[in-house]
Amino acid sequence: MSGDRADYIRGLRDLAGILEQNDDLPLPYQGSKSGMTFHYLGSPDPVTEMITAMQAIPCGFTSEISVFEDDDGRGNAYLDLHGELHGVKIALTAYRKKTCTQDEDGVWRIPDAITSRAPEAEATA
């Protein structure tokens, strides 16, 4: 295990202990209100890496495509997987164009290899 990885893990363990001992400290936003995010934005094979992460993290994930655009239509689209591990929100994210396919009607489809493990989230109005 690399020094950076070992230090990060040690820091998470220490932070958990600090939170246990200090009820007056708020929980960090990432992990309690939004997902602690694993990015696969630069991955050459994000689908395989996301599946590996889902297999390692024992929680139920859901999947969704999210699109962020400005008023001029510029922006990015992502495949997002969301789960929760004992109260800690987890997110896995990759670019939609590197993970999903677009059918002849222009609808983007999440790969079956993902949806078989992380069903698509219910659409909200």
Image: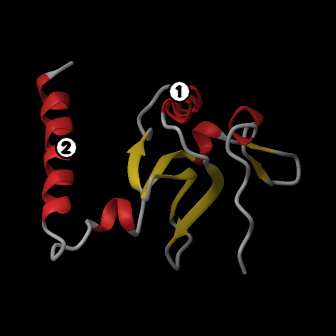
Q: Residue at x 16, y 28 (%)?
A: 6
- Image coordinates for residue 78, horizontal then vertical, percent: 55, 52
Q: Which mark is residue 14?
A: none
- Image coordinates for residue 74, horizontal then vertical, percent: 51, 66
Q: Residue at x 61, y 43 (%)?
A: 97
Of helix, strand and loop, which one carries label 2? Answer: helix
Location of mark 1 (residue)? 52
Q: Is residue 8 above or below residue 70?
A: above
Q: Quadrant of residue 31?
A: bottom left
Q: Residue furthest front?
A: 21
Circle 2 packing at 10 Å, graded few (<14), some (14-19), many (20+), is few
Q: Residue furthest right?
A: 105
Q: Quadrant of residue 102?
A: top right
For the C terminus, the quadrant is bottom right
For the N terminus, the quadrant is top left
Query: Which of the two residues, 70 or 98, is positioned nearer the viewer here?
Result: 98
Of helix, strand and loop, which one carries label 1? Answer: helix
Q: What amino acid type is highlighted by mark number 2?
A: Arg
Q: Residue at x 43, y 59 (%)?
A: 87
The tag earlier along the polypeptide, 1 or 2, is: 2
Location of mark 2 (residue)? 13
- Image coordinates for residue 85, horizontal then vertical, percent: 46, 49
Q: Is residue 28 above or below residue 48?
A: below
Is 99 left, or right, of 52 in this rendering?
right
Q: CA distance from mark 1 to mark 2?
A: 23 Å
